[in-house]
Amino acid sequence: MKYTVKSLQETKDVAEKFSSKLKQGDIVLLNGDLGAGKTTFTQFVFSFLGVKQVVNSPTFAILKSYQGKFVLHHFDTYRISVEEAIEAGFDEVLEDKDSVIFIEWSENIKPLINRPTIIINISRIDDTTRVIDITE
Ligand SMILES: Nc1ncnc2c1ncn2[C@@H]1O[C@H](COP(=O)(O)OP(=O)(O)O)[C@@H](O)[C@H]1O
Ligand SMILES: [Mg+2]
């Protein structure tokens, strides 16, 4: 499904629709340039799934985990190696089929992902306009 959104609110609306279909065991890969809105989209989805905490970019931590309707893991694997991802607990998280995993910049760790994924490509058109392309 491809959406052209013209504001944060419209991104939030897409995130709401998307979050209602997410199931335990799902892995979501978020692609797009820096500033496209990968973290913003994740924040909206996690919030709709009941996470009360502030969801920050996990760039430095690599992994942050939250409790909502299910356990939600948020990875940012920008410029990290497969070894570093494993050290951060990626393998264990992958085994936890009761949780949902969101991954920003998944390119480097593709070899570790052993089941189908939902892919979200976000493109920045201008300050507030984004194309959000979701492939399930
Ligand atoms: N329609 C929109 N959807 C998502 N983000 C938007 C939109 N309009 C403006 N923005 C802004 O773009 C920035 C996206 O940043 P972020 O989510 O951190 O990107 P990424 O994680 O892809 O690097 C935020 O400052 C956000 O407020
Ligand atoms: Mg980000």
Image (spheres, rainbow, N blue to C red):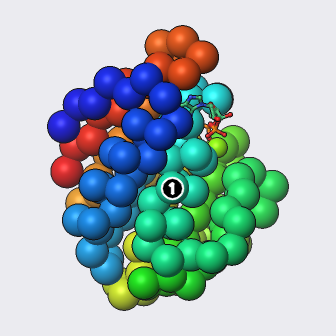
For this orientation, the residue located farthest to the front is 9
Residue 72 shown left or right of residue 115 in the figure: right
Q: Is residue 52 above or below residue 126?
A: below
Q: Residue at x 43, y 84 (%)?
A: 70
Q: Residue at x 63, y 53 (%)?
A: 76
Q: Which of the four quarters of the rendered structure image does ligand 1 lie in?
A: top right
Residue under pointer 1 = 44
Q: Is residue 68 above or below residue 41?
A: below
- Frontmost residue, 26 versus 7: 7
- Res. 10 visible in picture: yes
How many marks are shown on the rendered structure? 1
Question: What amino acid does circle 1 point to?
Answer: Phe
- Frontmost residue, 68 versus 81: 68
Q: Residue at x 56, y 84 (%)?
A: 67
Residue 67 shown left or right of residue 87 in the figure: left
Label 1, secondary structure: give it. helix
Q: Quadrant of residue 126?
A: top right
Q: Quadrant of residue 112?
A: bottom left
Count residues near mark 1 (Cα–Cα under 10 Å), then give few for <14, some for 14-19, many for 20+.
many
Q: Position of residue 39 (x, y in %)?
A: 59, 47
Q: Position of residue 5 (x, y in %)?
A: 38, 27
* Quadrant showing the N terminus: top left
Q: Residue at x 45, y 60 (%)?
A: 45
For this orientation, the residue located farthest to the top is 126
- Frontmost residue, 130 versus 86: 130
Residue 117 shown left or right of residue 83 in the figure: left
Q: Position of residue 50 (x, y in %)?
A: 49, 77
